[in-house]
Image (spheres, grey):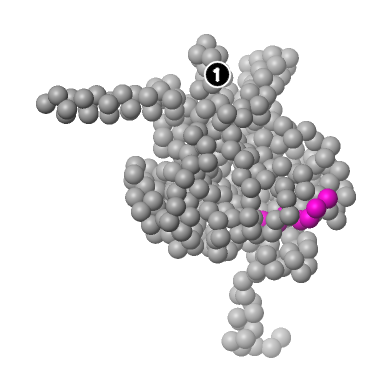
Amino acid sequence: MPPNTPETISEQFKKLDLKKLVREKGLYQVYPQVSYPPLEPFEHVDAGKRGDPKKASLFDNATEVFDLTPIIGTEIHGLQLSQLSDQQKNDLALLAAERGVVFFRNQDLDPYQAVELGKYFGRPHIHNTVGHPEGLPEVISLFYDEKNPTLTQYFESKAAADGWHSDITYENQPAGISILKIDTSPESGGDTMWASAYEAYDRLSPPFQKFVEGLSAVHTGQIHTENAKRTGTFIRREFVDSVHPVVRTHPVTGWKGLFVQPGFTKSIVGLSTRESKLLLDHLYEHVSGGHNFQVRFKWEEDSVAIWDNRSTFHTAIFDYFSVGRRHGWRVTPTAERPYFDPESKSRRQDLAEKAAAAAAAVAKKDSA
């Protein structure tokens, strides 16, 4: 073997251009047959707790900031995620915790930079089965087009409502922030939807809220196990089942959010099979039909979504197989083990109390 020269060393560390690679080669993912040990617990320190309530570092440096709906989704223009300061990252984590999902367009962020950004928000998750770019196990590649009839048939056989999920909730410490960049889009279609877990909780009746607050649910990666068996993919780490509260408290906002979804929730602890199915089906329909607490994002090439899995659900819309391809990649930092604090408040309650306190302060000042 020839000795390393500057040229060969440079070639060894050459960054992959995934956008170029998918357009020239198509499928590029690798599926290494290596075994990973079980994930070890870790203490998560949330960047959002260091955020400025006014998000001045973000808002004052952006050219435009606007909410897509009153409940969920904010879009920011004029900033590059590849160049954020630490305070901007803190403010972004806080904004995502509050608004659920934050969108950026025309981003130069590459997957290597995204992995480093992900490390700021938590411990990047390495998936048990899915394909990833060579040398980037923390990156999940998303690539679908009209040339894969088996994949097309699989997704078209599923109901759209079945796709709602929060990322990797089967893990004992599931995802916090997720980072997704779409760099290749079809001419039309391929949107993604998010729903607010806060508002999903708030729109339950008070007696029903009290009922579900006392419950826990089993989350499983069974769907990934089945897909691996169907496709012959090597399982690099055994999937685990985890038990999480049906209503969880967000550690940054302190708000209650619904935390079950058809992607990974298997059953309700302590209920009979029939009772569990009835309850989960109702909650799933509540989320999928909650158009008044959802946002639908139309991707443009090189757009990025940053969302908080602890306060949202999301689902991709597979309506574009006949018109083109869609490619992107995701980095998924993990966070704390889900918990429920009985003293926590709902989003509506907390915002109403703060608004009342602010109005009282203004009235007191005016009367002085």
Question: Element type at marker 1?
Answer: loop
* 66 displayed left or right of 35: left
Locate residue 251, reporting x and y percent: 43, 35
Q: Quadrant of the C terminus?
A: top left
Q: Of all residues shown, which one is farthest toward the front?
A: 366
Locate residue 309, reporting x and y percent: 55, 39
Q: Is residue 233 above or below residue 135?
A: above
Q: Quadrant of the N terminus?
A: bottom right
* Residue pictured at 78% horizontal, 67% vertical: 25
Q: Nearer the viewer, residue 127 or 157?
A: 157
Examine the structure image and report whether residue 195 is included in the region drawn in magenta.
no
* Residue pictured at 68% horizontal, 65% vertical: 19
Please say whether residue 240 is visible from this viewpoint: no
Residue beneath label 1, please? 204
Locate residue 340, reporting x and y percent: 48, 26
Q: Main secondary structure of the magenta part?
A: strand
* Residue pictured at 35% horizontal, 54% vertical: 60
Q: Which residues are magenta?
A: 322-331
